[in-house]
Amino acid sequence: MVMHFSVLASGSTGNAFYLETEDHSFLVDAGFSGKQMEALFAEIGKDMSKLSGILVTHEHSDHIKGLGVVARKHKLPIYANEKTWKAMEHLIGEIPVDQKFAFDMETVKTFGSLDIESFGVSHDAAEPMFYCFHQGEQKLVLITDTGYVSDRMKGIIKNADSYIFESNHDVGMLRMGRYPWNVKRRILSDVGHVSNEDAAIAMSEVAGDRTKRIYLAHLSLDNNMKDLARMSVEQTLQTQGIMIGEQFSLYDTDPKKPTQLITV
């Protein structure tokens, strides 16, 4: 049993994630136009019409921009919790009833050999949630769009093989940047996004002996850079006694280009 995944694109301008097992494949979020989503799938050599469904994390536009178009075109089931459905229905256009499914927070749905576990995060959306993917002994965690990583979240996501982990901003860049103060305050708040340093501290507390790969995701276009994020995370992990390359490796994601298909 093997899981493969690709971070199709990740950043403040749009987000999409692909996961497949031998018998199912899922898209998590569709934060780009339908045309851009098709192009991202083409880059990893996959066919969107073969998807088992689309999982939604929350209703912000950088996660659902192309959701309605893609789902209608390929007649794909959409899974989201009730509050997210209510918050996004007017944003994604009409979806046929037989394509609408409820996926409650803090529950598990099983698709063949794949168990998908949802968990709540702290973000200024209706009921934002992310996912742990379990297949046999393998565990993959997707966690972005959270102002902090609580002890409850840490318990759920602990000791995964691979993580796609938010490393949104450099606090200094954000404070000195062009955003109005109310936006800066929102990003820095408990319902905003985690900084590079806070992400690294959380990583140090959840990474375990199985952890091999951590992908830094949802980097702010204005308040972060790949090299800075990686350096900050690496330095903070070192202060926690973790040397990159010995226990696990760090990888970049890109706001426009997919990672290669990776085996968990």
Image: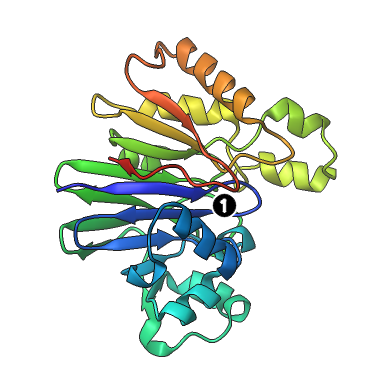
What residue would you read off at disc 1?
123
Percent position of residue 145, x then y:
55, 48
**Is 261 rendered above or below residue 20?**
above
Q: Is 257 on the left-hand or right-hand side of 48?
A: right
| Residue 227 found in image quarter | top right
**Number of callouts:** 1
> Which residue is at a point 26% across and 42% down the rendered structure image?
139
Mark 1: few/some/many CA within 10 Å (<14, 14-19, 20+): many
Identity, as a three-letter code, of the amino acid under mark 1: His
> Which residue is at a point 34% across and 28% down the rendered structure image?
207
Percent position of residue 203, x then y:
42, 28
Q: Is 187 on the left-hand or right-hand side of 205?
A: right
Q: How is the image coloured?
A: rainbow
Percent position of residue 63, x then y:
56, 60
Percent position of residue 94, x then y:
54, 87
**Is 92 rendered above or below residue 62?**
below
Q: Looking at this view, is 5 or 110 the one in front?
A: 5
Q: Is 39 on the left-hand or right-hand side of 210?
A: right
Q: Is residue 119 visible?
A: no
Describe the element under mark 1 as helix, strand or loop: loop
> Which residue is at a point 34% across and 54% down the rendered structure image?
19
